[in-house]
Amino acid sequence: MFCFQCQEAAKNTGCTVNGVCGKPADVANLQDLLIFLCKGISHYTVRLRAKGVESNEVNKFVVDSLFMTITNANFDRERFITRVRQAIDLREAVKALYVSKGGDITEITFDGAFWTSKEEADMDAKALEVGVLATENEDVRSLRELTIYGLKGMAAYAEHAFNLGHEDKEVYAFIQQALVDTTNDSLSADELTALVLKTGEHGVKVMALLDKANTSAYGNPEITKVNLGVRNNPAILISGHDLKDMEELLKQTEGTGVDVYTHSEMLPANYYPAFKKYSHFVGNYGSSWWHQIEDFETFNGPVLFTTNCIVPPRKSSTYADRIYTTGSSGFPGFKHIEDRKDGKVKDFSVIIEHAKRCAPPKEIETGELIGGFAHAQVFALADKVVEAVKSGAIRKFFVMAGCDGRMKDRNYYTEFASALPKDTIILTAGCAKYRYNKLPLGDIGGIPRVLDAGQCNDSYSLAVIALKLKEVFNANSINELPIAYNIAWYEQKAVIVLLALLYLGVKNIHLGPTLPAFLSPNVAEVLVKNFGIAPIGTVDEDMKLFLGE
Ligand code: FSO
Ligand code: SF4
């Protein structure tokens, strides 16, 4: 195996034996094979699209497949074997369709458009040839993978939007064209760099789509105090990012005596008016994704993963039989809740019955968290915020969105947040917030110093807020505003968020705790030169840098 798609890549170079995330080598390889086949499928569908033929089945299949290969989403070999077989069937179907429309398959030279075998041993063998290292030139490899990781993040958000009935065919068309472009040896480094930025442009589109899907279904997030304590009922813990799953779980648990709590990235579900009305929706339990090892142990009840980030349970853990996955997530031994069929809801009855047999959660903390500062809520406070900036009560905003992770160096973010002067505000989204959202950072004239917009995809809200401030302050560019960007990344959704910010023209983003292993020195240099991307330094150095002191 060779995988370098996330911030935990071994030695910041790449995982070669086993994933640091726990992904076994055979699964990593099968993920490569699945991506290879999605590229092959796309060779036909981009040509069919040019003939006016669109395949909804392929659109969904490619998006779901990309999502399944995101870090920590799915570790289940069997699911990938099945998926590879489905990919071959689907590819043969679009190939036949292309031929029936007069298409000439001799124009296509990419192997993924033709390679076929449904034998596991053949799949394992082929997978070894088609991974990241199949591209020899390290700069081309870097730009291709940067694009593909952006597409993976985009696919995750597109799937959540799809689940709520929102689609953008243009996004599907772009994903498939970009997959084909990553197989085109004639593209220059400049053309591939343009592809990376175009990926960012579509990242903005898909985040806007998901924002619309979430807010039109569940209302605009609003200022909310989220309870951190527990009640004395059996309960289900829901993690991940899928709000449709959240809705259906809340509906199906109502009146059953089973409570619902959020974990990690599902915390922002507490901010939506449509979910707040459920009296058995108690609050948030525990911390960011990698704390699940302890949090799931003490929660006592079943846990539902609607997406990543799954940590393989330790041998000594007692909770593995209480974990359920759904959607693109999966793990061998965890029970999987099947997708919606024929317009029906998902059936969560097995997890609800499981909860009834469990003890209530053990209290691990008390108190409240405040959040819900997505764009509509911040716009409602705009006068107050603008006044505070004009009066000097707010000196600067720090966008500290992104991810949390296990690396010790991530303490930097807690220390940085603590060291920020009291006249600064942190704008956050994603699980990065858990590094500082429980610190007593206070407020500025009633405006909390940590404004949480929501999930990582709600970084879109932060961009909308920046664009609004640009308008209010009559600035020529968002880079003239008193906003600094100190972003933490972990996996590929953070990649699409980063590319989206670059597309929107945001400069001088500091990215940590380490720069991506998949950036070759030359590609990193292009990002530094054109966008001012920089690694983090020490808290002291960065504080001086950001505050110009
Ligand atoms: Fe975090 Fe995981 Fe949301 Fe990611 S829970 S790390 S960027 O999946 O998607 O922020
Ligand atoms: Fe390694 Fe990250 Fe890939 Fe897992 S996803 S194998 S930790 S680079």
Image (cartoon, rainbow, N blue to C red):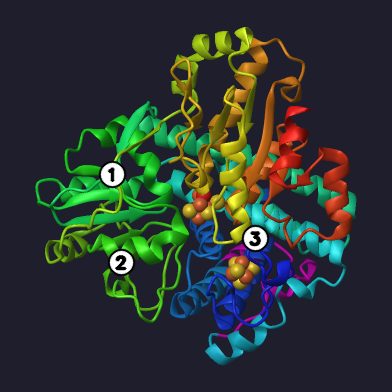
Q: Which residue is mark 2?
A: 297
Q: Mark 2 is on which residue type?
A: Glu
Q: Position of residue 131 (x, y in %)?
A: 70, 74
> Tag 1's secondary structure?
loop
The nearer-to-camera label among 3 and 2 is 2
Q: Which residues are magenta?
A: 94-117
Q: Which residue: 49% across, 73% down?
A: 83
Query: Residue 315 in magenta?
Result: no
Q: Position of residue 251 (x, y in %)?
A: 20, 45
Residue 542, above or below 187: above
Q: Is residue 102 left or right of residue 142?
A: left
Q: Is residue 126 left or right of residue 338?
A: right
Residue 484, above or below 310: above
Q: CA distance from mark 1 to mark 2?
A: 18 Å
Q: Which residue is mark 1?
A: 366
Q: CA distance from mark 3 to mark 2?
A: 26 Å
